[in-house]
């Protein structure tokens, strides 16, 4: 059973991986991933799907230029007002996948949205590609703590949360967000973009997992 500490450790281990080995995901791991997806769907009333051995999810650019052997993915499907929850659950899944010895790639743009929506008959907001990476990926360039945070108190739990959020995947790795701590209350602001709602959820998960505290307020600016 994966513990909270296992997921926290995965924050440092997980990096974006776009190129994968032509190796099928082991049956036991497929079963665990499906169980995790189903549990999250039940908890958050979502309709995410895990798909294996199918290379149709990416656009031509994503499939032939940006990636290799991207044949397994999780479809982030749900209503428009569920995007934050989808991002939150996608973050959980990416870290969980890492604990299984697999790698992942959060895809917000270069996937075949129309094809997936026609197939599943509901809105799709992104996918998470997964598999056995050709490598473990590289650390992405991070902004400094001061660039993404304003705080009236130098609390250790808050710093842990922001540092974890800096390691989270965001669209184009722009890290257009800001955490604000005032009077013990944490607020998260994310810059307006097509992926902003998903990013809110992803960042919330990473912060809350590492800090052990809830984000009380969040908004898109």
Image: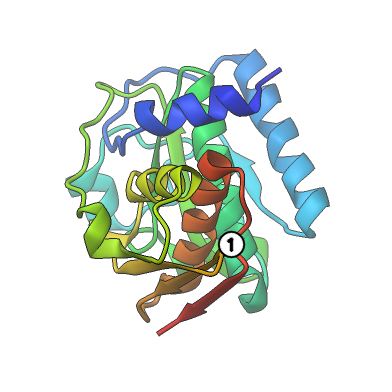
Residue at 37% x, 52% y is 58
Colouring used for the render: rainbow
Which residue is under mark 1? 215
Residue 121 pos. (x, y %) = 67, 68
Q: What count of labels does the image hold?
A: 1
Residue at 40% x, 47% y is 159
Residue 174 in view, yes or no: no
In-front residue for pair 150/30:
150
In the figure, 146 relative to 36: above or below? below
Residue 84 pos. (x, y %) = 58, 66
Residue at 62% x, 68% y is 216
In the figure, 221 relative to 177: above or below? below
Crowd band around label 1 with a 10 angstrom C-alpha radius: few (<14), some (14–19), many (20+): some
Asked if residue 199 lies left or right of residue 142, the reply is right
Residue 169 in view, yes or no: yes
Asked if residue 217 lies left or right of residue 203, the reply is right
Q: Residue furthest bottom?
A: 221
- Helix, strand or loop for disc 1: loop
The quarter of the image holding the C terminus is bottom left
In-front residue for pair 193/130:
193
Asked if residue 155 lies left or right of residue 119, the reply is left
Quadrant position of residue 1: top right
In the figure, 1 relative to 90: above or below? above
In-front residue for pair 215/159:
159
Q: Residue furthest right?
A: 42
Quadrant position of residue 174: bottom left
Residue 50 pos. (x, y %) = 62, 41
Residue at 82% x, 50% y is 42
């Amino acid at each position: 059973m994966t513990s909270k500490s296992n997921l926290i450790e995965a924050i440092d281990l997980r990096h974006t991986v776009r190129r994968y080995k032509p190796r099928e995901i082991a049956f036991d791991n497929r079963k665990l991933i499906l169980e995790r997806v189903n549990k999250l769907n039940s908890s958050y009333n979502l309709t995410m799907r895990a798909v294996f051995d199918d290379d149709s999810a990416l656009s031509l650019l994503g499939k032939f230029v940006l990636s290799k052997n991207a044949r397994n993915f999780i479809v982030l499907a749900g209503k428009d007002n569920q995007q934050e929850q989808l991002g939150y659950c996608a973050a959980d899944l990416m870290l969980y996948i890492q604990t299984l010895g697999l790698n992942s790639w959060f895809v917000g743009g270069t996937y075949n949205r129309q094809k997936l929506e026609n197939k599943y008959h509901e809105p799709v907001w992104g996918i998470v590609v997964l598999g056995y990476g050709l490598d473990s990926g590289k650390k992405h360039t991070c902004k400094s703590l001061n660039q993404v945070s304003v705080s009236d108190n130098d609390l250790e739990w808050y710093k842990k949360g922001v540092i974890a959020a800096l390691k989270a995947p965001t669209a184009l790795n722009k890290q257009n967000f800001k955490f604000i701590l005032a009077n013990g209350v944490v607020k998260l602001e994310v810059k307006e973009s097509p992926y902003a709602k998903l990013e809110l959820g992803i960042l919330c998960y990473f912060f809350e997992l590492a800090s052990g505290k809830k984000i009380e307020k969040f908004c898109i600016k």
